[in-house]
Image: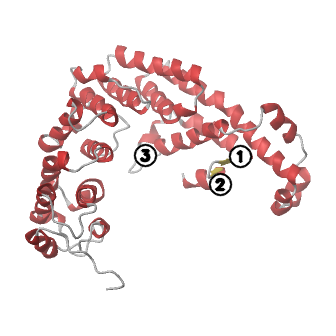
Amino acid sequence: MNHLWSAILHQGTPWPATEVVARVAVGLLDDPRLDQGAAPVRAALLGFLAGVLQVCDRAHDTEATLEHQARFDLTPFIEAGDDDALYDDEEASDALHAQSMLGCLRVRPIILAAVRDGLDSPDAARRVRAAMAFAAFAQSVPEPPRKDLTTRVWTLARTTRDVDERASLVLALGDLGELPVEFSEDPSPGVRLCAALALVPAQTPDDPSTRWLIELLERQSRDVDGWFGHKPPQLAGPVRFVVLERLSKHLREFEPLAGAAEALARASRREDADEEWGPLLAFALRGAEGRALTVAQQRLLAALVENERVWVPGDAKPHPWFNQVGLPFNREACAQALAQGRIPRRPTRDG
């Protein structure tokens, strides 16, 4: 996937190969294998297609101008294999850029047609994948089709009898910037969870959906994966990790999350460092070095100190998380900081 960004759409710059690769990527969108494995690639592939559509948004010249520039014959430069000569020639470099831009413009309706066909499919899994694709690059879709496709996702979410599909579509609505409040009262707890996740960016810690998610982490965090027959593909990994990431991203202060953080830290394992207690530690103790620890910060640190599963000698994985907050990955040192009620400030180079 990195090759797509380094060679096919490097830093947003299209190339003649961009159109061809985008067509292949569109053809892969219905492949369920994109959601399999330890690192599913669907999100990255959708990100690439979104990048192609964003290129279309940045087309400063009219298609007529691009067509005129693209007529310049690049054959001598290509046969010579001299890239420097091509880029040093203004007409040649303009032609290369114009051909690349026109390719992106040609593939745009193909991408949108794939989304539209997917949303109209009789297969629920395909409808979900199409909604995810649309949500990934909706901002680069022109207004009339964007409105129509968004309405289609709303209609599907309201009418499907498939609970897992409804949960996925509700998440897609959230990614589209919509507010699926009506699904907060859905009979399915999985759908209600997805509605709450979709609403978090628009809410405060005191809003019902956010409070419910925080209480969920504190009391039922390991139960929620069982709420789905087939978990929405947007919820990769344990659902509690997704809930925690969403809350941490949108809560400005750690305190509302303190009770849930303590509960998670007490049940966490070494393997959960990067997805659970590491981010919690960074969120809770950011800027705390040299200052008195708050009660909420002390509760989290105490839970970690007491949890033997976190402290595996020789394990390098947790070190970056502790370094971020000025602590060593050392149980005794953390216990001492807890007893002192503060994290000692690290000495500077000047002493």
Tell me the distance, in whole angstroms, between the alpha carbons under discs 1 and 2.
Answer: 9 Å
Residue at x-position 15% and y-position 71% = 334
| CB within 8 Å, label 1 to label 2 | yes
Q: Secondary structure at mark 2?
A: helix
Q: Residue at x 56, y 43 (%)?
A: 48
Colour pattern of the rendering: secondary structure
* Residue 152 versus residue 259 in the image, above or below: above
Q: Quadrant of residue 321?
A: bottom left
Is any part of residue 182 visible from this angle? yes
| Quadrant the C terminus occupies | bottom left
Residue ID for mark 3: 40
Viewer-nearest residue: 325 or 204 = 204
Q: Residue at x 17, y 68 (%)?
A: 311
Q: Secondary structure at mark 3?
A: loop
Inspect this view and state whether residue 230 appears.
no
Residue carrying label 1: 17
Number of callouts: 3
Does dot 1 land on a helix, a strand or a loop?
helix
Q: Are marks 1 and 3 in contact (CB under 8 Å)?
A: no
Query: Quick check: 174 left or right of 278?
Result: right
The amino acid type of the residue labelled 3 equals Pro
Q: Disc 3 versus disc 2: distance between alpha carbons?
A: 21 Å
Which is more toward the observer, 327 or 303? 327
Which quadrant would residue 177 be assigned to in this image? top left
Q: Sequence order check: which comes first, mark 3 or mark 2?
A: 2
Residue 283 drawn at (x, y percent): 27, 55
Q: Residue at x 64, y 36 (%)?
A: 57
Nearer to the camera, 342 or 157: 342
Horizontal side of 32 relative to 6 (left or right) equals left
* Residue 226, disc: none
Mark 2 is on which residue type? Ala
Q: Where does the image place residue 9, in percent across and percent down from the top left? A: 64, 49
